Amino acid sequence: MEQPHLELMSRPRRNRRTPAIRSLVRETDLSPSRLVLPLFVHRGDDDEAIESMPGCHRYGLEGLVDAVERASDVGVQAVVLFEALPDELKTPTADAAADPDGLIPRSIAAIKTAHPDVVVMTDVALDPYSSDGHDGIVAPDGRILNDETVAILVEQSLAHARAGVDIVAPSDMMDGRVGAIRVALDDEGFTDVGILAYTAKYASGFYGPFRGALDSAPAHGDKKTYQMDPANVREAIRELQADIDEGADMVMVKPAGPYLDVVRAVAEVSPVPVAAYQVSGEYLMIKAASAAGWLDERSIVLETLTGIRRAGADLILTYHAVQAAGWLDER
Ligand code: PBG
């Protein structure tokens, strides 16, 4: 007997019928090799849980190398390093930022010795080192001094390059820093060290838990004179143009989830790979909601990361990297 049926010329559900068919027609791939794991280091030997970011730690050098190993074991081949400096070592001129014997240079060397193939990226900015908690030098009248700051960022980048970093990632949003860093690296023979520019970094409330992790919240004022206005997207293209002209190898949009239209706009015209940073607040919202039993962590993490890839990001910085890689492996 003939089944009753609608006369449909098109039944999109046919392409969704089995897991194998779905994977044949999937438009967006998400794989661990696209993920970058941000890691925090501190001067203690012991690893310290970060209250504002459940599941994340401030690592000592040994713990750091172990964390890199766990990441690389599940296919996450890149990390980006941030230092949590004790308050008493922070100064108005962020002196520890460019210390050649500082913790970041030592961390780079430790990782490169143990895992030479892992891509080591470092954050370049002054806020973890500044007693003002700003990414730049603060003048007595409260202005953030651009060119004075760039001079220190250059020294910070050189200190990382001498220690063996693969890619420096300036997150400060000063004008002209990518070009200044490029010239200085080349002058010292570091033509192979790459620059991942934080190109469209917005003045976002989503950085709150990260500032808790580093105790790096601004002592006065906010970051709106250097980080971008969340209302703007055209300006992201202007920043992109500048970073490309100055020699950026990769560009970034940050945060990721609330700025997918910016990721899309940048990806459509960028001649270099585009990164997106799923930041601490995005991480914490997922962690908090799943800890309360309100959301399923696994599906939410994979869905948000897929969304960021679908919007056009080639690589994604995410605190979920290792967990996500484990889940991707099971799929
Ligand atoms: C600082 C920096 C910040 C983040 C990365 N680098 C915080 C800020 O700009 O205040 C945020 C990362 C996150 O929230 O996960 N240069």
Image (tube, rainbow, N blue to C red):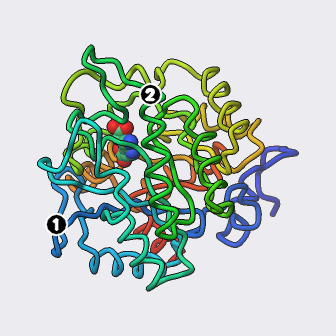
Of 158 and 213, which appears nearest the observer? Answer: 158
Identity of the residue drawn at 20% across and 38% down: 131
The reply, left or right, for residue 192 in relation to residue 221 is: right
Is residue 204 in view? Answer: yes
Q: Are marks 2 and 1 in contact (CB under 8 Å)?
A: no
Q: Quadrant of the C terminus?
A: bottom right
Which residue type carries mark 2? Gln
- Determine if residue 282 is in view: no
| Residue that numbered label 1 is attached to | 48
Alpha-carbon distance for marks 2 and 1? 30 Å
Residue 257 x, y percent position in the rendering: 48, 40
Establish if 285 lies above or below 161.
Answer: above
Q: Residue furthest left?
A: 88
Is the residue marked by circle 1 packed among few (<14), some (14-19), or many (20+) residues within 10 Å?
some
- Does the beta carbon of the residue at mark 2 sit less than 8 Å from ligand 1? yes
On the rendered image, what quadrant is the N terminus found in? bottom right
Q: Nearer the viewer, residue 326 or 292?
A: 326
Is 40 left, or right, of 177 in this rendering?
left
Q: Residue furthest top?
A: 141
Please name the residue shown 22% across and 58% down the image: 54
Image x and y of residue 108, in percent: 43, 70
Residue positioned 26% across, 49% down in the render: 289
The location of residue 115, given as percent across then percent down, is: 48, 83
Chain-order first, disc 2 or disc 1: 1
Tell me the element at label 2: loop
Callout 1 amino acid = Glu
The mark found on residue 227 in the picture is 2
Image coords of residue 231 (percent x, y): 50, 18
